[in-house]
Amino acid sequence: MSTVDLEVAVNEIQQACEGVQGGRLPYFFLVGAGISKPPISLASEIEAECKKTAQKRNRIDDPPGKHPMDTYSHWFKKAYPSRVLGQKYLQGLMRDKNISQANFRLAHLVLEKKIANLVVTTNFDDFLSRALILFGKHAIVCDHPMMAERIDPEEQNEIQIVHVHGTYWFYDYVNLREDITNRAQPSAQTTSTMVALLDNILSRRVPLVIGYSGWEGDVVMTALKRRLSGRNLPHPLYWFCYRQAEIESLPDWLKFHPDVNFVIHQQKSKSQSDTERVEGESSIQSRMTLPPQAEAKGISDKGSEEPVLPAQQVLDKLIQAFALKAPNLTSDPLQFFADQLRRSLPQDDAGQSEGDIYFIKSVVERIERAKQREQEETQTIQLIESQLEKVRDALRRSQYREAIEQGRTIRTDNMTATQLRELMNAMWSAASLLNDNSIEELNGYDMVITIDGIMVERKIEEPSLREMVAKALVSKGYRLGVLNRNEEAVAAYDEVVKRFGEATEAGLREQVAWALNGIGFQMICEAKQSWANDDEQLARSILFKAQEKITSALERAPENPVLLGNQGYIAFLLGDKARAHELLT
């Protein structure tokens, strides 16, 4: 089984696209639910909701099997026994919902046609089509087997989208085990099938798999199996995994094919100050046997037991590597809308009796006048706006480091409240998405904190931004800890407690809990070092202080597993066997 990290995969994809002959795009995107969450729920979440709905109607029969597809199908059908009812439920989940960031990024990629112009998806939502329309491009969409022949894998200019299981717009969607299995079967009567279409696509292009878990019985996996059986691919297939553990659930014919690479989050090596146990602790450990999860955890562990690779991060990396320009909608919106409207008007023809009955030309002229006024006003406020536009442009292109560098060049003393809010949001987005423990990431958090100070000084009330500031301080503390700048890390955490310790808002209380956990974590590391230096008395004294911090954190987040784990770990180090087992098992 071959695994690679994101950097390597993107570099190799870029090389493959640079070397294509005759402009033929070598790849297509194969995407699943991972690119639409949020706001769309995953199958497990939909199953839980359907189970509640079914039980309210006293439909409580147990599923016929324990496989996730069996339990999902069972509860969905119990909750919505007809196709129309199921369609209405899916419409409620998906219709007019905000488009996910990952779908916007995917639309940006296919718009430029540097990697692929064809997307195959198991999703029912129309996020990708809507994102493309916002960017000014309509796609050829196939959402039913009878439309399969409209898709041409050799087409290089038009954007094409294939919904292999249909969409929420129609009740003939394919959602349950029996339907999914049937769609994967070939037909002896017609070639207008999803099976034939996928075979055709796979014979000409290689998939880049993002946000798709891979159920062996569906039409996608059966087509992949046929393509990989005994044959090599012209380019490697890259399967981007949200979690590395997901690979284990995939079939051997996929896992061990020589042309399949699984792309995983590269686990950065942890420093001793992070979670590594130091010498001298063995004397404490010898007193008892504790579960393997008995380990102190910092902020980075709060969301998951293992590192993850979200779809947006993958798509961001591809946009960065191919240096895509920002879409016209975002770089020159007024001209974009003027051009869109102008293209929709009938050509001037003196012989035509009907005219522009909606006077759309006058609308175009108004937009162009607005553009002219904007240009005139920009000359007056040229410097700040041009600098802000550089920040915006870098974010649109997923160039987060560049966005932070551009943001730091702006003089904030002459900025309006609106501009300060925008820059603050931009710096937070860039820093949190950069997520690489770099100095630039720290600079981004510092910009958020600095701008907040300016707004407070000017008495600009902005309650909605308080949580962002708290998050920036917590993130700064964690990154400083990773860089072994422990005193500065504790200072950042202390600032969170000082500024927001009495807050009643749930979001702020959570950030204060993480800050207290961060302080406690640093104390645990310090205590372990004291043990390594044979100073058990000092170590125990420090651990009691750490215990106070974690206890205070638990008052704000009593069910947080990381905090409970750290409390148990402290009990373990102090020799309280019963308490440690209670908290850690």
Image (tube, helix red, strand yellow):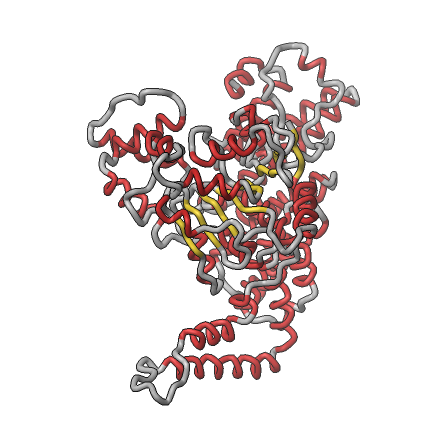
For residue 219, above or below residue 352: above
Residue 328 locus on image (x, y percent): 54, 67
Q: Toward which corner of the image does residue 356 lie, by quadrant?
A: bottom left
Side of 145 relative to 255 (left or right): left
Q: Is residue 421 above or below residue 508?
A: below
Determine the image quadrant of residue 435. top right
Give how far across and how far down residue 273 sits, in percent. 72, 32
Please, is residue 537 above or below residue 472 in the view?
A: above
Give me the residue at 64% from left, 27% from top.
Answer: 1
Q: Is residue 498 visible?
A: no
Q: Residue at x 45, y 44 (%)?
A: 121
Front residue (pair 20, 273): 20
Which residue is located at x 62 percent, y 24 percent?
295
The image position of residue 376, as x and y in percent, is: 57, 84
In the foreground, 470 or 140 = 140
Report the number of numbered marks: 0
Which of the two residues, 298 or 67, is positioned nearer the viewer here?
67
Identify the residue at the far bottom of this view. Answer: 350
Q: Nearer the viewer, residue 409 or 117?
A: 117
Q: Residue at x 60, y 22 (%)?
A: 569
* Residue most extreme to the left: 57
Residue extending farthest right? 533
Note whether 511 is above or below 342 in the view shown: above
Quadrant in the rendering for residue 447:
bottom right
Q: Is residue 103 visible?
A: yes
Q: Position of residue 561 (x, y in %)?
A: 51, 29
